[in-house]
Image: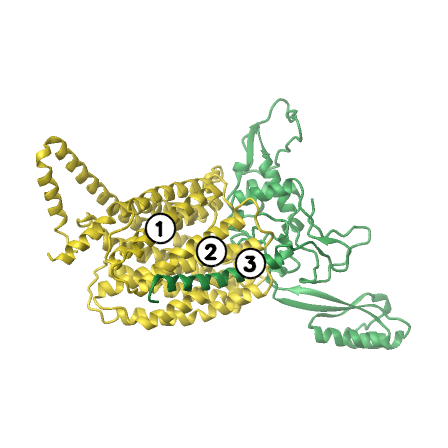
Amino acid sequence: MKNGFSVFIAAFITLGASWCGFVLAPVLQLGTAKQTSVLMSGDTYPVQRIGNATLGLQVYRANGCAACHTEQIQQSGVVFDVIVTGVGKNEAAVVDLISSFVKTEAGFGTNQLPKTILHGVDKIQADSASDKITAAGGKVETHLIPTGADIARGWGVRHGVAADFLYDDPVQLGSQRIGPDLANVGARFGTANLQLLHLYAPQSVVKNSAMPPFRFLFEVRKISGTGVPPVRTGETPVPLQLPTGFAPPDGYEVVPTEDAKNLVAYLSSLHADAPLYEAPFTPPQIPTNQVPTNAPAK
Amino acid sequence: MNVNDISQQKIDASCRVPLLALFGVAALWLVVGLLLAVIASLTFHAPQMFADCSLLTYGHVQPAANDAILYGFCIPAALGVMLWIFARLGETELVLPLVPVVAANIWNLGVLVGIVAILIGDSTGFPWLEFPRGSSVLLFAAFLLIAISAVATFGQRKERGLVPSQWFLLVALLWFPWIYSTANLLLASGHPVRGVTQAVIGWWFANNLIFVWLALVGLGTAFYLLPKLAGRPLQNHYFALFAFWTFLIFATWCGIPQGAPVPAWLPALSSVASSLLIVPLIALAVVFVKTVCGAKVTCKGGPFCYVKFGTTAFFLSALMLIASECPNFSRVVEFTWFGPAQEQLQIIGFFAIVICGAIYELLPRVMGFELPFPKFVRAQHWCFMLGIILVVVPLAIGGIEQGLKMENAGTAFLDVMQATLPFLRASTLGLLLLLLGSLLFAANVFVMTFKWKLAQIKTVIAFIKSPLETASASASLRRDQGEVKP
């Protein structure tokens, strides 16, 4: 370190190395990422957000929602459930085998199928049970279930992966949970009206919530005429149904602005719940009369 | 008064105008930033307070406060200190002294545009890079201008050999333009990179700015001031050289959170690098302890105390960073208040305190007269010390408790959040103390600037009144300035 040039070289080499590692390499690895296919389904994931939801991401960014909310589910591991769906031709042997797993006084009858015989076990136990029953001629399904506090809280079904953010710009991962995680909020928060209500007056939906109300995304206006909403071009905003204590004075109504509606559209579009190669799980059984939706909802 | 003293006075005087331009507005931004931080923390006392005011909603004020402190105060103030250290160590007058003055104004315009943009909802959405494109361009240009003046001064040095302080500061001059341009071109330009690559580059930038850049400049300043104030050389050169290299090699790879939804090699590499960071930290600690311990200095809350406390805070902040990158501990504290506690300790506890100490040390010399309120120096030291402890300790403990409660899915999230509120409210008190300290700092800097301008006006008036007396007037001015010990 005798002269300025050697100091410059030191900086160039060290920072250049980390630039190659954390800037160039991720761009090469992920810069051309494409949609991936959803496991056990022909669908692709993710689907580009459309219309209002894309605009809503900008409202999310502009109001700094990521200062308090993350969009990344954490997962601590996986467990397995073993479910017998059929006993096959060798019924007596399979029933005996199943009874050795299911230790109830009533015993096991074929009318109880499908029957979960092992719950929350590791892969070795699940495989051994599954092998035994399959060898005896029974039909077995092994379900893969992610575990972790976030998943137990119902915030999501699997850990977050790079694919969840493929079409986002800017990517709003967030780093702090002053509020709950939102990676899968579209799947759990109910109707758009409830979300609007929560934005206008969080404490009216979640008592003692520390979330600041976003009343500036709403318009408090006089109800005109006989309570019939004024005729406007385009969609007529629906006034919020606010509980007492949060409602505006008599003769006034609260209507969401475009920003508020777009933000809710974005929140509703947050569905990180597709089983993927890098984050596998067995989706819950869907009744056959419903079409499975893994992609972000509209 | 020997020849050496006179030349040192000349060197100091050459820095006067550029340094005033940088420090004056920086002090103002520090006050503004801490005021915004107090406003942000009020949300945890009464969430409904700013429900109708979009400017002051938490998601606007919090990043604005962070950026005002970092970009408004830390970086320009540090650049001013750097110019002075280069001039002093090189025993040469500041080269191109007007360039930093112009740059300071460009920089402050950029910060103003950026802060206003964040408050009206025009931020880029990337942590520590919230300023929109126009503002970033101004900051980048201003930094380059100041760097030109700094490098030119460095090149003019009469003492050719380099001391550790110069390595650290010189590297920082290259570091910032590289990371800032990379991050802005790849994230905030018209064609950003896709998907989580944005987040990875954002973390790389934030770590290289908040941890590495601040450490380089803060340690460079400390390694200049500590030997100077302790009256003995840095102990010793080889430890410093080893620490310098290992710090550059390892520190720049930290910063990717362990639970991030990115390919697993990224957090793994970051975790390894941060555990290796313990090596340069030990070397730096040896240098620090051997230089400071046993030095016969009674600092009485003066610059020596500032630098000592600040450097100690750096070691704690680095240990917190290492802990938060350790996979097992990270599982608990990721997404909690532990991270912000570390950032506050790094930015205010370490960097702002070291830089304030350096400014108190250099300002009387550069201006040629004593501080207007010398007692404020000690008062500010106590305000900053207690303030940062009251911010960091509650946030760190609250963060760990939050993390432990989050681990247990049986605890409702609302209860977890409620449990952190007392800690957040305690930290408001710390922020108020920091704000008070920053007001004392601003008072000293502003009154000093005012006195200097007054003296200038007096000279001009004297010149207008009787051209024949100017020589004696300026001589008397010089006599006033000569009273200060170099």
Question: Where residue A129 sits in the image (x, y, percent)?
Answer: 77, 75
Give the CA separation, mark 1 to mark 3. 28 Å
Residue at mark 2: B206
Q: Nearer the viewer, mark 2 or mark 1?
A: 1
Element carrying mark 2? helix
Residue appearing at x 55%, y 48% in the figure: A207
Depicted B111 relative to depicted A281: above or below = above
Image colour assigned to chain B? yellow
Q: Amino acid at mark 3?
A: Leu
Front residue of this view, candidates B249 and B375: B249
In the drawing, what numbered circle is on residue A24?
Answer: 3
User: How far apart in space, not on screen, are marks 2 and 1 (Cα)?
Assistant: 24 Å
Give the mark, 2 or 1, whose residue is nearer the N terminus: 1
The numbered mark at residue B148 is: 1
| Quadrant in which the C terminus of chain B is drawn | bottom left
Image position, residue A221 (x, y; %): 56, 28
Q: In the orientation shown, which residue stands out farthest toward the right?
A: A89
Under tag 3, what secondary structure?
Answer: helix
Q: CA distance from mark 3 to mark 2?
A: 16 Å
Query: Could you tell whether B94 is left or right of A95 in the image?
Result: left
Q: Which chain is green?
A: A
Please state, as top left, top right, bottom left or bottom right, where the N terminus of chain B lies in the image.
Answer: bottom left
Question: For the residue marked with disc 2, what is the amino acid?
Answer: Ala
Drawn side of residue B4 relative to residue B315, left or right: left
Q: Are marks 3 and 2 in contact (CB under 8 Å)?
A: no
